[in-house]
Image: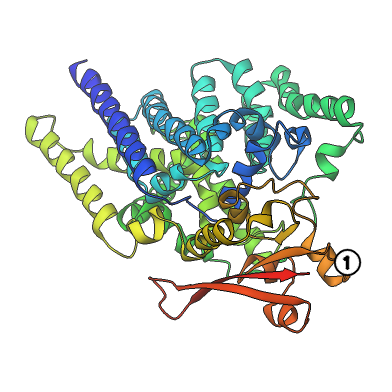
Amino acid sequence: MSYSISQKKITLSVVILFFVTMFFIAFTCSGTGDEGDSIMHFLYSKWAFKHPYHFFHHWAKPVYVLITCIPAQFGFIGIQIFNISINAISIYLVFLTAQKLNIKHAWLAGLLLAIFPHQIIYSLSGLTEPLFAFILIALILLWLYDKKISSLLILSFLPFIRSEGMVVIVVFLMYMLLKKEWRLIPLLIVGHLVYTVAGILAYDKSLLWVFTENPYAVGATSYGNGSWDTFINNIRYSTGIILYYVLWSGMLLGLVYSVLKFVLKKNVSFTLEDMFLIYGIFFSVFFFHSFAWYKGWFHSFGLIRVMVGVLPLAAIICAKVLNELFCRLPNNKSSYYAIFATALLIIFFNFFIKKYAISSMRDLNLHEDQQCQQEMAKYMKANYSDYEKLPIYFTAPYISEVLNMDLFDEKIRPDLKNDFHNNTMHKPCYLIWDDWYAPVENQVKLEDVQARPEFKKIKEFSKYEILEPTKKRTTIIFKVE
């Protein structure tokens, strides 16, 4: 009992330390976790009251917008504090889940989640992954506490936070069929029914709009594809190098225990809940993203950050491996010292092995392209007072934030791709060209802009990346009279 109480105290200490540290970083560092989707999701929430259709926007994720629209009104720092808060709570929920799964040293699961590099980095973002992770571990815990109806109702809305929610629903469905929970299965479609009806009533959408408007449902990605083992290799950046090997040892252990328990009928401490709700969901999401990037499907960009949504499960898998080792130690004070020493060693490796540890320059501060855009905004405000009156064409979402402009108002920010390629620019206007989003998202290359005499170059802002000194990031202001 005393050890159980101390585990709770340890975990609460980790939660408080995580929250306080991240709160401090949010107010002292300028990073946004990601300069693309992180900003876009924040902007969809920020401007949701002016553009209510955001509450039904499939890419923005309706439930995410609904939950975060209030924090977003306090600026990007509002969404950061929101994500920091739910990630801190997730640490405690992971501890409770590990306890419920009979992991003796359950506090390790909470600690490991707190020190995963991507758990820290993306707490400072506006991304949907932290909310997905929080809701996922919460509904699993509810199920383990026999709050099945509440768990399934929440699960039914998970795809409206991130599309991987459908993968989780499929795994849950398989688990429920094995458990013969027939009468509860219809609850899995409640979320889709609610949003179908709400969309029809609010915007006269089609009956199947929750499927037909899903941007990931069909079609190849515009970003290409990659190696089949991309996620296998790169998840070490999410977990840190030591826990990377612990995680894969845990997956192997789960496979061995599955065979022993359900094929060979041996008496091992491994349940259907372990197999499906922890290992099954983690592996299914991992496989889904690996396959999507390998095939070039579902607009995948091969970003390992998508695994943040299931990092709580990774923490439990890692804790289960360590628990298997530690439970073989004698039950005395020396063993507890050894456990804490191991935990400290893992923390050291996660924060000080440079290649896989957090870099303040790379992860906690503005990226070089954002710095260029920040300088651009300062220059525009100081020298061109008409920028608030004329249309401004741009693609990089951070430009909207630094200029405090409504990204979704077509009068303020018209469609660059359409107007540029059809030569229908609203004149006079400004074009703020950046080296990534303009050519990749809107196919507007710098040479194409420079080839048109009506585009007068005002000023260029450039910076070389610190971590890649040969890579130059550029933002350029053009004006069309």
Q: Place residue 36 in its image quadrant.
A: bottom right
Locate residue 187 relative to residue 73 in the image: left or right: right
Instruction: Indicate whether 480 appears above or below 322.
Output: below
Q: Indicate how the structure is coloured in the image.
A: rainbow
Q: Is residue 340 above or below residue 197?
A: below
Write the residue at 48% across / 41% down: 258
Residue highlighted by disc 1: 424
| Residue 8 coordinates in the image, percent (x, y) | 27, 22
Q: Nearer the viewer, residue 375 or 442?
A: 375
Q: SS class of the residue under badge 1? A: loop
In the image, farthest residue toward the left: 334
- Could you tell me if residue 87 is visible in this image? yes
Where residue 425 appears, as percent x and y from the top left, is 83, 65
Residue 317, position as x, y percentages in the image: 40, 42
Q: Residues within 10 Å of mark 1 (few under 14, many from 20)?
A: few
Instruction: Estimate the x, y position of residue 339 in percent, counting from the top left.
Output: 18, 39
Q: Residue at x 66, y 76 (%)?
A: 457
Q: Nearer the viewer, residue 471 or 479?
A: 479
In the image: residue 191, left or right of residue 94: right
Q: Quadrant of the C terminus?
A: bottom right
Q: Going 71% across and 64% down the picture, which residue do you hit?
A: 430
The residue that appears at 38% across and 71% down in the rendered structure is 466
- Whether residue 263 is visible, yes or no, is no
Quarter containing the N terminus: top left
Q: Amino acid at mark 1?
A: Thr
Nearer the observer, 203 or 88: 203
Q: Quadrant of residue 179?
A: top right
The answer to which image quadrant residue 416 occupies is bottom right
How many numbered discs? Answer: 1
Q: In the visual, does 182 lie left or right of 209?
A: left
